[in-house]
Amino acid sequence: MRAHTNPAEGEDAGIDLSGISPADAREWLARMLLIREFESTAGPLATSGAIPGGMHAATGQEAVAVGITSVLGPEDVAAASHRSHHVALAKGMAPRSVMAELYGKVTGCAGGRGGHMHLADFSVGFDGSNGIVGAGLGIALGAAFAQGYRGDGHCAAGFFGDGGANTGRTWEFVNLAAAWKLPLIVVCENNGYAVETPVNAAMAGESVAARASGFGLPSVQVDGQDVAALHRAAAEAAQRARAGEGPTFIEALTYRHLGHDIGERGQYRTTEEVEWWQTNRDPIARMRAALEKSGDLDEAGFHELAAAATARVKDAVEYAESSPLPDPATVADNVTAVPLKIRGAQ
Amino acid sequence: MTTVASKRTTLSRAYRDGLAEEMGRDDSIVVLGTDLYERGGHWAQVTNLGQQFGRDRVRNSPISEAAMVAAGVGGAMNGLRPVVDLNFLDFAFGAMDEIVNQAAKVRYWWGRPVPLVVRGTTGFAGGGAQHNNPIESWFCHVPGLLMAYPSTPWDAKGLIKTALRGEDPVIFAMHKMQTGARGEAGGPDDLVPFGQAVIRRPGRDVTIVSYSVMVGKALAAADRLAADGIEAEVIDLRTLMPLDLDLVEESVRRTRTLVVAAEDYRHGGVGAEIAAAMQESLFGELDAPVLRIGAPFAPVPHSPVLLDALTPGADDVERLARQAVKTAAGGRRP
């Protein structure tokens, strides 16, 4: 597989907004700004230790989450990877609940029991990020199994990375979804690197999308830094899913601006490469430029959206910091519904 | 327990009947696995369920254990009650992440029920090392999973019914050598609770704790011991998680002597936990060291002679029970 370095160099960076309402486009921009602000704030907090356990930032990949989830309602499900603040927030999770979970507070979405790789809110249809590579797709597969069994017209989206595209389970999931025509949207966020291993060193074949097409489902490769393109691909996939026509595979070519984990000092990619993506293919800058070009956003309007994101994240941090820690005496509570009567717990 | 609707049946059939009854009252129950619809599973555990409930509810799946269990976990988080039938419990190795890292954690993180059953046939039999692994203790070491391992048709039926009305992921094990084990089974309302062991034979001299296929061997040993005036009390655990240590403790307080009989490897299994828990609670009241019967620490061999050497039998139970009783008699203070 060819290297992921600057594949779009020389191509037009413009975003085609035809057929998309300015209100929708502004809303997507607002969501991307919220995600960017959230991670830009949480990252240093994780480095300083205020947030325990580190974190994986999706900075640079916001358009994938926002574009795909733009076609999903709260009854539709998304499940994602170890790097999925962006999917959680795009699917509608409250920044307070997510930030408090990062802090390990009892008000977090998992009561401080999960951490940043175990975010979920079933009321908005986010069935969890996942610390195991490829496993989030399996949860989405199961959600689609339930939706398909009921025939309720809902669908599920499962996210994983190029690393996940090299696990066997991913292809078991894709095959089962295709064989059973489940209402699943399979989303590979190909950011070019599985931790520090570039795709061209680890993956045979032409592309992830080409590999997927062998499983007998429609498979497309999309510019992962173009929220409108992702929206269109997802809309088609969701329509197929809801109509009972089965799953669709979307490979989104994207890029993470930061390291695999916060604080990483990797030598595996050049500063020039990172800066090229930040400068030329930043999903937020591109969307802003497209909206300004179409006359649907001015500078003041942009700053209004940015300020709203800043305020929500500031509120989330204050909420998390002022929330209580979990009671240590509850550490073995609610492991199962049936009481386990384990002895010698203390 | 009511016995109005009880009848003689086999363990596999009783399991199937329990599953069918629950499928009849709850259409969120879906069974998936290989060779289920036509074949009825490799152990006749779902015979005719396909014809009764249709292909939507009894689904033949590809040989993709990770996908089957993942579909089960995600389905259970979204309103289904999936029964993933692995045929051989050994095949759980291909889905261990889905069981251990997904199903078992969801409630702890988010309070979300995961009403999933993963059923598999297990226990020593012919067929070699990869189809006969004793892995019940593995699952008992994972917080978040329940583990049922019935020894009678009554319990197989009653426990699957309870599992299908609960909220927890359940590993449901059935022993190969007991597929055709005969006995009574209960009616539609005869549920067997998890975490409640039962005394199969009362006795005053020694407590023998067992489960699954070893219950029958312990009862056979107890018959022989009785011929010599030794009255063994035989306990069937029925579920290994929860583990009913309270009943074991109550019994050992009376007999002051304990033998743990499992087919599992003796080293590091559930039997070791029982022994440790009892010496913690009853050190001063035990008249003999707790003795354990279990398999030697080796993969399951093919040659019947070797397999026999690996498999704990009634003779082993009898021998260790005699040894424990002898020690107790010798050491008992006046």
Image: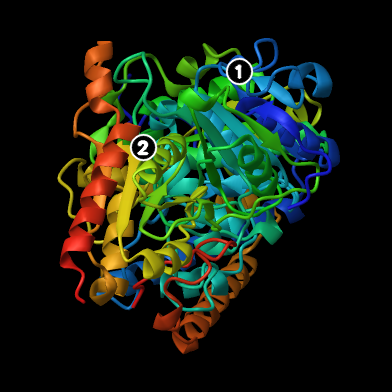
Give amino acid for label 2: Ile
Q: Is residue A32 left or right of residue A197?
A: right
- The residue sitting at 61% across, 58% down in the picture is B112
- The residue sitting at 22% across, 62% down in the picture is B329
**Where residue A111 appears, x then y in whole percent?**
51, 73
Front-most of A62 and A329? A329
Front-most of A101 and B178? B178
Q: Chain of mark 2?
A: B
Q: Is residue B319 visible?
A: yes
- The residue sitting at 82% across, 33% down in the picture is A151
Q: Say if B66 sits above or below B261 in the image.
A: above
Image quadrant where one finds the C terminus of chain A: bottom left
**Where residue B266 appears, x then y in whole percent?**
24, 42
Say which element carries label 1: loop
Front-most of A206 and A288? A206
Q: Say if A271 sits above or below A29 in the image.
A: above
Instruction: Please rate how many residues cluster around mark 2, counting C-alpha atoms within 10 Å: few if below 14, some from 14 to 19, many from 20.
Output: some
Say which element carries label 2: loop
User: Where, by quadrant of the figure, is residue B332 drawn?
Assistant: bottom left
Residue under pointer 1: B41
Numbered label attached to residue B135 = 2
Q: Say if B254 sits above or below B120 in the image.
A: below
In three-dimensional space, the C-alpha distance between marks 2 and 1, rounded to whole angstroms, equals 21 Å
Q: Say if B303 sits above or below B143 in the image.
A: above
Q: Is residue A82 visible?
A: no
User: Where, by quadrant of the figure, is residue A244 drawn?
Assistant: top right
Give amino acid for label 1: Gly
Q: Chain of mark 1?
A: B
Image quadrant where one finds the N terminus of chain A: top left
